[in-house]
Amino acid sequence: MEFRGAHILSVDQFDRADIEALFAVADDLRAYAARMRVTRVLQGAILSNMFFEPSTRTRISFGSAFNLLGGEVRETTEVKASSLAKGESLEDTARVLSGYSDVIVMRHPEAGSVAEFAQASRVPVINAGDGPNEHPSQALLDLYTIAQEMAGRGKGIDGLRIALVGDLRYGRAVHSLCKLLALYERIDYHLVSPPDLDAPAEIVQSLLRRGHRAAAYHDLEPGIHDVDILYVTRTQEERFASQAQANRYRGLFRLNQAIYTEHCQPNTVIMHPLPRDSRSAARELDADLNENPNLAIFRQTDNGVIVRMAIFALVLDVAGAVHDHAQPVTWYTAKRTPA
Ligand code: CP
């Protein structure tokens, strides 16, 4: 694909060559993300960061990534803080914001809404999560992390065995990651969820059509045997019609150190897109795993900045100019080794 000026709406846009190109740029930017150098390559550029659903990681890391490239960030959070609350359409909002910005990042609760917004935008739009549909930048940072973790174990992504655990029906990070991994060869998917929260049939069918293995499990323990990656997700409670319905799934699948030790291989990587639900009734990923060296969740979040810097560098066509605008870091920072 041509990254320059492109909207990034779905992982369906990418092929393996695109991913390799993006990851090469990400590798080149690691020193900037680690504050070993700064660059002003996007000086004067403006990002509109529009988040109409709660977010910590995606919003802050997109904003930080843009700042680290020298650009400025304007934020709107919550529908009620924008004129969408007065009945303005997504189309009009896009026309207005694209006059103010060089690129727009948007999260919205409705599937397809970011694509609808992008149709009316004159500048690139990046999907930061559209309801239960997709979360492409999360899948890219997850895949970047998987590649690093597997390389550390002398393996690649082809032939990967992955267990995806939890709410596979509404989990947009899972949907995007499943599709992105399908670009590789011989992926073995263990789809581990409560019966009513199975992965969408069309995604499973597309994995099988591409020659991958995909098996559904409705109990945790048999699903997490013999995998390289254990990708745990929370129940997406905000997608259910009522809290009472969501409560039926709370705490059904919980991974803790004892279950990991008994059922997983000793070097199985543990991932989660976060946030994990740390309330006592949920705890799908227990804090007693925090000292487990195979827990990669904070390596994932660090990689989020690097991968999002690479997305901006490619979409705004400055990847080749980053080092020309580099400057030494002049302030104290403890963060001086690449993540
Ligand atoms: N993983 C993720 O999207 O986290 P936030 O909801 O905090 O952005």
Image (cartoon, rainbow, N blue to C red):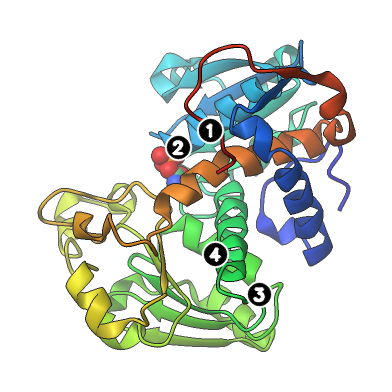
Which marked residue is nearer to the observer: mark 4 or mark 2? Answer: 4
Q: CA distance from mark 4 to mark 2?
A: 21 Å
Q: Is mark 3 within 8 Å of ligand 1?
A: no
Q: CA distance from mark 4 to mark 1?
A: 21 Å
Quadrant location of residue 190?
bottom left
Identify which amino acid the numbered label 3 is placed on. Gly
Q: Is mark 2 within 8 Å of ligand 1?
A: yes
| Residue at x-position 37% and y-position 60% | 295
Q: Which residue is mark 1?
A: 61
Q: Which residue is mark 2?
A: 57
Ligand 1 positioned in quadrant = top left
Assign a secondary structure to mark 1: helix
Assign a secondary structure to mark 4: helix
Circle 1 packing at 10 Å, graded few (<14), some (14-19), many (20+), is: many
Q: From the top left corner, tell me how far across and down residue 297 is, in percent.
A: 41, 53
Q: Which residue is mark 3?
A: 156
Identify which amino acid the numbered label 4 is placed on. Glu
Q: Height in image: 60 above or below 132?
A: above
